[in-house]
Image: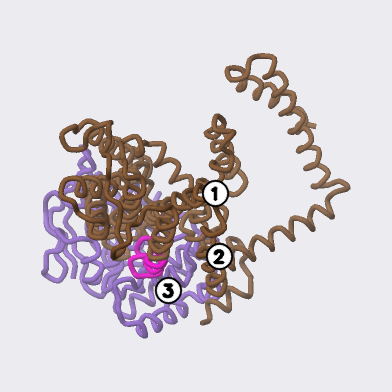
Chain colours: A brown, B purple
Amino acid sequence: MSAYARVPLIGLWFAFLALPLAGWKNSLWIGLGCAAVVFVVSATRASVQSGALAGPADQIKKRFTSAWRFIEEKSYDKRYFSILLLLIIALPWMLDRYSTDVLVITGIYIMLALGLNVVVGFAGLLDLGYVAFYAVGAYSYALLNSWYGLSFWPALGVGVASSALFGVILGIPVLRLRGDYLAIVTLGFGEIIRLVLNNWDNVTQGPNGILGIGRPYLGEMRLYKPMHFYYLVVILCIVTIFIVNRLDKSRLGRAWAAMREDETVAECTGINIVYTKLSAFAFGAAWAGFGGVVFSAKQTFISPESFTFFESVIILCMVVLGGMASIPGVMLGAFILTVLPEALRELTLFRPMLLGGAMVLMMVLRPQGLLQAKGQRHHLERDEPKSEAEAGK
Amino acid sequence: MLELRDIHFYYGHIHALQGVSLEVRSGQVVCLIGSNGAGKSSTLMAICGVNAVTRGEILLEGEAIHAREPDEIVKRGICQVPEGRRIFPQLTVLENLEMGAFLRNDASGVKEDIDYACSLFPVLHERRAQKGGTLSGGEQQMLAIARALMSKPRLLLLDEPSLGLAPRIIETIFEVLARIRDEGTGIFLVEQNAHLALNFSDWAYVMETGRIIMGDEPGVLRDSPAVREAYLGE
């Protein structure tokens, strides 16, 4: 009965949590509600484990697992790409301007999340200041455009290069740092960049931000509608996916994986840690630069406010939620965490709470992320004949 | 083949290696025994270039290698099997072996050597599609040794290969090590299990608080009262 003993305690705990938000009367109801939910859940679980529901529940679970595995397998299947691509191309014609705009933002976040995935997912370096590179990309276009009139396409290159350079600049001092220490330094780095942008009035115009950033041109055509940006972002995302996927399978990608698994052993195996680590930071940062340039061209206005620590956290959540090191997973994570908050606009107030709750649930129930990385599946299935076959080829 | 001359190394303020000098002749098995914290692992890490020495010289066949990066040292034929069966847990056995050959470009040679490694440890062949992390302790140690062999080292550095393993497994591993030695690879063995190490090697050093206090033939050390008392438990 110990499972049921927790019920009133959990109710009390949630009532206590809700107290400052909802007043004591409402919190009482919230506490009761939570207790009821927990009671129902534990009762069902008990009967699923050993009671009447065990058989059917097992069936459902099996079905669900195999369905999900099917999706995981297919997310790497090239045949489905063309169908998906057609859908993606058709999408803005079926949606209004606002929704298209949301999708543009989603696309930018997909690039950012894929970039962060290189650092966190592939190379295993926890970066809490990733937004700094996004800011570098955005500001390099904004500044070069408003000062020297540099147009979008060359700025794309410059933005990528300067972000990558900043990636290396961050990488050098953290070469010998691991885990928590690395996370703290990257966090500090992100804040430094934001504070510099916020306070260097002569150059960045401080918190006022930069206005009137030029739109990109394609030949004679000026790109300004959400739909224009939509296609631009789709193309850039495809480029990103292609290159990131190639990187993952390359020699460098293998070195990243080894470094992620065990840095010292990787070093003893003959992997040059300095080069491997710096290239992870540089490649990761480059995509943030990409995203940043597109972001400033789309918004025509940027200020340090867009590049806060919370942005870094959201991008990291996308990677973790979707599945570290899994390219389809990370994309799904970026999609969910940009589209869902827009869809739930009425609940703005509760967004951080829902996000926090979702992350806690994820970590408890499915720590490997929604779509697990290909190489990390089939964890404990020792004698699966299929993996034998895979090894044979 | 390998010579350390008066090596000093610091962990922050701690003077971990206080002038270590030793020599590994080619084709020999040399062991380094000593208690916890004596500096045995630090010595190996210094040879590998992971620990940057502050003073002294490390010579590999006359060439100074102490200022080199770890990957350059592996390229020159020294490979370490670090303490505690450190394999890449999320990679399969096969991928672990391939990672060991990271610096090599001869795909066919690598394939041959994977077969060779699997012939030394047949269990690795059976488990080749499995994640390294799902192997048992002994299998992981075998994988770690096999992975190090994939770089075709002239000198293999082993850090406590017997640690935490069942006697039968230790026996298997040392049989394979003997085979590797007979095929001409030098072995520098760090062990806490002094019995085992002295029986297996041609020359032995004893280390205490960052210094080499003795270096002689295993038979001589086995008879020395100091070693008997401190390391052989007699």
Left or right: A166 in relation to A76: left
Task: Identify the residue at horizontal 23%, vertical 71% (top origin).
Answer: B75
Disc 1 marks a residue whose amino acid type is Ile
Q: Which residue is mark 1?
A: A336
Image-quadrant location for residue A274:
bottom left
Q: Which residue is mark 3?
A: B176
Span colored in magenta: A242-256
Chain letter of mark 1 equals A
Q: Earlier in the sequence, mark 2 or mark 1?
A: 2
Label 2 secondary element: helix
Residue extending farthest front = A220
Q: Which residue is mark 2?
A: A87
Asked if labels 2 and 3 touch by Cβ distance under 8 angstroms, the answer is: no
Disc 2 marks a residue whose amino acid type is Leu
Disc 3 marks a residue whose amino acid type is Val
Image-quadrant location for residue A232:
bottom left
Distance of label 2 from label 1 (alpha carbons): 18 Å
Task: Identify the residue at horizontal 32%, vertical 45% (top origin).
Answer: A300
Residue B41: x and y in percent read 30, 53
Distance of label 3 from label 2 (alpha carbons): 58 Å
Label 3 secondary element: helix
